[in-house]
Amino acid sequence: MDYVEFNDYKMWKYSIYEENDKFLFDEIVTCIENEAYRSASVMIWVLCAESLYKKLNILSESNKALKNDLDKKYLKNKNEFELLNLAKDYNLVNDVEYSQLNTVREARNNYAHPNFEEPNKNEVLSSLFYITHIVLSKSPMYSYTYGENLIKSHLLSDPYYLGNKNDYQIKDFASDFFKRVDSKYYKSYLKLFFRLTEDLLKEHNIKNQMCSNVGLIFIKNLILLDSNLLKNINEFLDKYKITSCNVFSEEDIWQLLDENSKFRVFNYSFDFQNNIFTEVEFLNKYFPLYEKDMLEVNLKEKIDEFIDKNPPILILNSSLPIFKLYEKIIHDFKSYDYYIQNDVAKLLKSIDLTLFEKNQLEEIGRNLLQAADGGSWTSKRILNFYLDNMGDEKIPISLIRGILFEVFINENNEFRFKEKHSTNVLINVLNDKSCNSMVEDLLELIKHSIIKNNYFYHYDFAIKKINLLNEQEKVKHLEDLINSIQISRCYSINKIFEEDNSALFILPEKEIIYPHIFSCLKRENKARFINFSKENIFDFIKFFANTRYSQKESKYISIDLEWNLLSQFIDLNDLKEILEKNLEDDNLYFKERYLGEYFLDNYLYHIDETEDDI
């Protein structure tokens, strides 16, 4: 060994990484100062061996092979030569450093035995220099080769290397790994992880899945540790599409991307020909970003369209929230496409309906009846199944409530009667004691409902259907139901008149209304109706008249006036006087004059009839 002079050897202490190593270093310095070089030589190797063991032991926490080797080759027999070999095998020291440290070990072996030999000061200082600068001054950091070997041979090849660690524990492991890596190697390690993980993701098996999951967690951890690595994002997107889409679609990474990169990642993911994600995996990946408003409008629209065109089973099999499944069920029921409605009806029977809220179940029940009423054959079958099995805990009462209400009242509180399945619904629901509360709610809803689109024939149709059912079957609450419908009819008539006095006169199929109008109008509205009618006498007469008019001949072909109904509102003699006065107007329209003259021509005959009826 060449002559070495180190006058500042005491200052080497301040380069030592571990505080505990400094105490033994001070003892070695004391020996040197007291010229106890033999003792110093022995203690130098002891300090070196202890430091090597501590570093290898720390590294073994993330390397099973090292842990096993450390147990078998060193701890079992305390073989210090094997300890030094392990430091070399696991890249803690290189070949030159290994040779220098082995010289220190051999010196210790030589001077620890009674052979009457003693080192000189320069030999001791050389040994102290070697251990300080090769071992003591270094943290238990991975060399690049060590880290590369750990990644290739263990982390991404042995699915059981990390034992039963969950994703959070793997994340902690990754964090510790990168703390032990020089940051100058980050870029190289990231490329290595991307390349190896991409290969794993291309072949689907359990082993690869477990290892690729480790790779994805390590990549994400490294990017979050150093976001500057995303400067190479296009390189990753071009070479490693599968890995890129898996990593960059994670929420905390996504928000680090520029808009162009987001667009590319999304479109690679959305193009299922790339075989990056299945449809369910795509939803699971991107819907959390959708919910948190982290997607551009055009990307959100693509997801909406994707959900709309796919069957609800896709949502059921995904991790999307239950309200999305509810929205999809309602959307598909409203599609007016039998095949789509059949699919969603079939799905209803296979899922746990109790997952939905009460108001959601009621809406589902409404839409199931709508689909069945529209002709969906599977909806009919499922509807009948629910009705026939009422009381089963798997069939929520809120669903039945929606079915019952939809027969008479839509979600806008409008009355319109859906007749097709009404008999089966009424027989099953009205006779069930557990449904008494919902029946009472229905009766109140009907009373205060408005007729849909002013189609008053729904009232008469519903009453006729219920009366017929009452004659054929013993069903509770039918009389109450008819009474509520009649009240609703009156409510609608008054509502229409109050909003627009003339609206009643121009209703379609008004002949359905006027048999009930006198009994339905409120007292104050009757007076208003009569006063308004006197001011608009020709509209009033026409309201109670069934007429046929020929445009070609420009004349009425026939007129049929409801004299008895007319007389309930106004004295026919008073009406005669009003008409005679109005007919004096030379500017009357032809149709108005014709109606007035028809009344006067037939007045004497019908006044006798109405008086006889009275």
Image: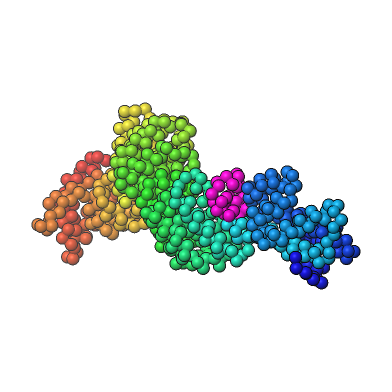
Q: Nearer the viewer, residue 219 or 292?
A: 219
Q: Nearer the viewer, residue 291 or 419?
A: 291
Q: Do we see residue 513 in this rendering?
A: yes
Residue 52 in magenta? Answer: no
Residue shown at the point (64%, 51%) measured from the top left: 62
Determine whether, in the image, residue 428 is placed left or right of residue 159.
left
Left or right of 50 in this view: 285: left
- Would you place residue 237 above or below residue 479 in this image? below
The N terminus - image quarter: bottom right
**Do we see residue 401 in this rendering?**
no
Query: Residue furthest toward the right?
Result: 34
Looking at the figure, which quarter contains the C terminus? top left
Q: Position of residue 205 (x, y in %)?
A: 47, 45
Q: Is residue 437 left or right of residue 556?
A: right
Q: How is the image coloured?
A: rainbow
Tell me the magenta residue range.
Answer: 149-176
**Picture layout, residue 186 above or below residue 607:** below
**Residue 592 versus residue 74: which sits nearer the camera?**
74
Q: Where is residue 290 drawn, in percent x and y?
A: 47, 57
Q: Magenta-highlighted stretch: main secondary structure?
A: helix
Rendered residue at 22%/53% (across/down): 542
Q: How many marks?
A: 0
Q: Within the image, what quadrant is residue 71 found in?
A: top right
Residue at image point 79% right, 70% down: 6
Please give the name of the residue rendered at 41% of the width and 31% of the height, measured from the top-left corner.
389
For residue 582, side relative to residue 530 (left or right): left
* Image-quadrant location for residue 49: bottom right
User: Which of the pair 517/122 is nearer the observer?
Assistant: 122
- Magenta stretch holds residue 173: yes
Q: x, y percentage for residue 449?
A: 39, 47
